[in-house]
Amino acid sequence: MKLPLKIHHVEFILDFFVLPVKGVEMITGVWWLGHLGEVRINFRAFTLGFDWNDQLVQLQGETVVRDMPLGTKQLCKMELRGEIAELFQLRLENPTEPNHLLEIKEPRLRKLLSQYESVFLEPKGLCPVREINPHINLEPLTKPINVRPFRYPNFQKVEIEK
């Protein structure tokens, strides 16, 4: 479906496809950039320039960049509102420094962590074989129970935990 798209007073006629993506209004993609011909991008100034209908067009991106990472609370709220389409985690597989304790400044904490370093190592392989494997006996044809945990006021919680 061809529709007009107006960006900074420049109108483009583009093919649009309906995608089940939340949190964005539109994705132009590389296909759209291919129609522009030669494109000049300045990543520091957040600008994208190209010639369109014998005119130089300069698009200015948003220069305010959020430099604060999202907190767990904010991320959970976004998830509940359906605002997260995809979420990725980047992880360093082969760190250059094998000892992560170098980052810890508190001497007592460093000593404690180095004393019990084997507890905090990444697991390799399956769990060890044990004499007794814990298990829960269920009645036949029992359906999974999905009950939210109870919330108690602090004064009741202390009494319950006695």
Image (tube, helix red, strand yellow):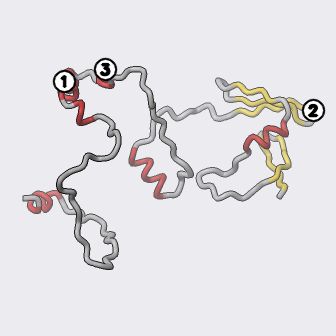
Residue to which mark 1 is pinned: 111
Quadrant assignment, res 103: top left
Q: Nearer the viewer, residue 19 or 5?
A: 19
- Amino acid carrying label 3: it is Leu
- Amino acid carrying label 1: it is Lys
Q: Residue at x 75, y 40 (%)?
A: 30
Quadrant assignment, res 116: top left
Neighbours of disc 2 within 10 Å: few (<14), some (14-19), many (20+): few
Neighbours of disc 3 within 10 Å: few (<14), some (14-19), many (20+): few
Q: Quadrant of the N terminus?
A: bottom right
- When the figure is inspected, residue 77 is found, relative to residue 11, above or below; the finding is below
Neighbours of disc 1 within 10 Å: few (<14), some (14-19), many (20+): few
Residue to which mark 3 is pinned: 102
Query: CB of mark 2 within 8 Å of CB of mark 3?
Result: no
Q: Quadrant of the C terminus?
A: bottom left
Q: Position of residue 89 (x, y in %)?
A: 48, 40
Secondary structure beneath disc 1? Answer: helix
Secondary structure beneath disc 3? Answer: helix
How far separated are the C-alphas under marks 1 and 2?
Answer: 68 Å
Residue to which mark 2 is pinned: 54
Q: Residue at x 20, y 21 (%)?
A: 107
Residue lying furthest left: 162
Sequence-wise first label, 1 or 2: 2
Q: Nearer the viewer, residue 89 or 116?
A: 116
